[in-house]
Amino acid sequence: MTRVAVVGAGVSGLAAAHEAARGGGGVRVTLYEREDSLGGHARTVAVDGDAGPVDLDLGFMVFNRVTYPNMMEWFEELGVEMELSDMSFSVSAQLQDGDEQTMEWGSRNGLAGLLAQKTNAVSPAFWRMIREILKFKDDVLTYLEEHDKNPDLDRNETLGHFVQSHGYSRLFQQAYLVPICACIWSCPSQGVLGFSAFFVLSFCRNHHLLQLFGRPQWLTVKGRSHTYVNRVREELESLGCQIKTGCEVQSVSALEGGGYRVVEAGGTEEAYDSIIFAVHAPDALNILGDEATHDERRILGAFQYVYRLLEEGGTMFSFGEAGKKCQAKCVMRVHDPLFYWKVATEADLGLADAYINGYCSFVDKKQGLLNLLLILIANRDANKQSSTSTSRIRGWWTPMLLTAGVASAKYFLRHVSRKNTVTQTRQNISQHYDLSNDFFSLFLDPSMTYSCAVFKDEDESLEAAQQRKVSLLIHKARVERDHHVLEIGSGWGSLAIQVVKQTGCKYTGVTLSEEQLKYCQRKVKEAGLEDHMTFLLCDYRQIPTVRKYDRIISCEMIEGVGHEYMDDFFGCCESLLAQDGLFVLQFISIPEERYEEYRRSSDFIKEYIFPGGCLPSLSRITSAMSTSSRLCIEHLENIGYHYYPTLIRWRDNFMANREEIKSLGFDDKFIRIWEYYFIYCAAGFKSRTLGNYQIVLSRPGNDKLLPFADNPYATFPAA
């Protein structure tokens, strides 16, 4: 006796169990179903009607002989009675423009349905639309035939482009094509024309939706779908099949001598010769657990699912399996259906754009967005762990969502156009840092330090933590009174003033922001330090080489250099640094495994906040250093875990002062962009998927380092 277990009793499981049981040859089938009823979505409930209970199908249950021949044959073999369905298509559309204000017509009852609105009979526009519908079928069949013959043809052309290229009228779109597509896919009408033409038109062809009349006759199960489910149950029981409803399969594992062990949720174990999984791919993987083979993980793991939970007042979505590893939870409110279109067509940038435009919000206003981004990070990393080697080299041309291909390319081309030449760099920097000094003062600490702070504890003030970070950089640079310090990216001068006050050294700062330059010059004059300090408005490639500097400090400036110019940056530093000098570099870092993909693509930060920016990986820094200089690493420290509280304090200050920010001329959209920016970055540092390094560099043979202690960087200086 061969024992076969079928896991899952939807239509696939019922059909599989029936086929196995009736095959003879001594096969005994056991059918497992987690729910209390069979049939999956083929669920029938009784509702009260005027004449008594009425059976109502919760699932869409129609079929025809042309599209569903296998199901029809199975039903006929089982003796399931079927009846004709009067399903048809009708439109009542409020037109956006044109002479016709409304349009009503239907596909049922022939000409009478077409002329449901009596004015259609004398409307030239209506009859032109009918001619276009007939022409549409020929155009679609030709289009699909060409694509079937030539798989290299672009299959991402949008339906809107197809319609435009074939010259269809707006009435055809508004009163025929858009309504029929929106009906089938339950989506907002404004998003239909952005769908893939090949996908939509193939579906219409396969389901015989291209003709007005002469469509295949639709059928449904007589007495609703529970009739066929009950008939299958009777047949299975007569064939000796054991049916276990309300019985969840917890795991399936291979036995040493052959066969498989099925463990039920209650702990009962059964042995079988074969297992048939008739469940969704992630459920099958969950049941297999560690027993899943590489091919099973690769194939089943490639299926992407969205789970929907409906509650009063809205729809909640949770995504994927990463929730088991990520404890973050959020409840999102979608205010505009364009949210779904934005996410589907623009992926992560679409999510940002949807939030910025107010298409969605979060119940938890402080943690909701952060938790969503943490969930997305967990999903991204989970996908990377299970991906094949080919997916690791994904570039801008293969976005995470295929529907995002056009948008991904658009953003990439815009990103490429912002390469950091000398001229373009000034424009990129000005776009961010020249917004307004008053604006930045509303969320930064009083010292106007715009980089990662270093906190002694979670309750320490942002100002004290920033003072500690500045002192730490000065300490690591070992600045002395007779030194001349060059800071590349001087910001608003917090380090400049502190290093001169602490050591009495000479200082030169470089910035590309006119607003920062004005601010620094004013603060230096107020401090009476003009004799010690000089500020230059120039690119790092334009710093005069008439002198050498004993120390170079650059704090979170290299992120604006760009991948292609990092070698140039280190070459400039090499030419400016004295023989026994030290170079202290602080920078935000992206993990090595994501760098190549990241640098070739655009993202929210590059698009909205830092045009031309590129977070380097640690190896990109060291490769640029070794290629263009003699510098080597003396000390390295990752302070990235301090960036999360830094960003949260900036966000809190920003939101507390949003009315003052609006008074400076910035609108609500700008507020949401910057709120998203702070939380977007905070999620990266909280998840430890971004780092922030401080590196001390010098040249080989620098004997000036010898007098220091064994570990001169062991402790943080006091704030």
Image (cartoon, rainbow, N blue to C red):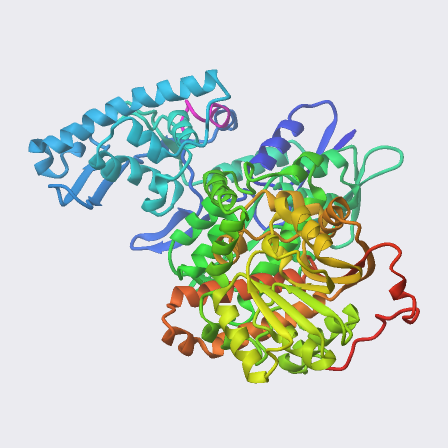
| Residue at the front extreme of this rendering | 546
Q: In this picture, is 25 found above or below 418?
A: above
Choose between 570 and 285: the one closer to the eye: 570
Residue at left offset 79%, top offset 53%: 631
Question: Is residue 460 among what the camera can see?
Answer: yes
Residue at left offset 84%, top offset 70%: 713
Residue at left offset 64%, top offset 44%: 282
Choose between 419 and 348: the one closer to the eye: 419
Q: In this picture, is 376 found above or below 330?
A: above
Q: Where is residue 575 in the image (x, y as percent from the top left)?
A: 71, 53
- Position of 568 with respect to 512 (left or right) is right
Q: Where is residue 448 in the image (x, y as percent from the top left)?
A: 57, 75
| Quadrant containing the C terminus in the rendered view | bottom right
Q: In which quarter of the image is residue 445?
A: bottom right
Q: In which quarter of the image is residue 530?
A: bottom right
The magenta-colored residue range is 64-72
Choose between 290 and 679: the one closer to the eye: 679
Residue 70 within the magenta-colored segment of the rendering: yes
Question: Is residue 248 among what the camera can see?
Answer: no
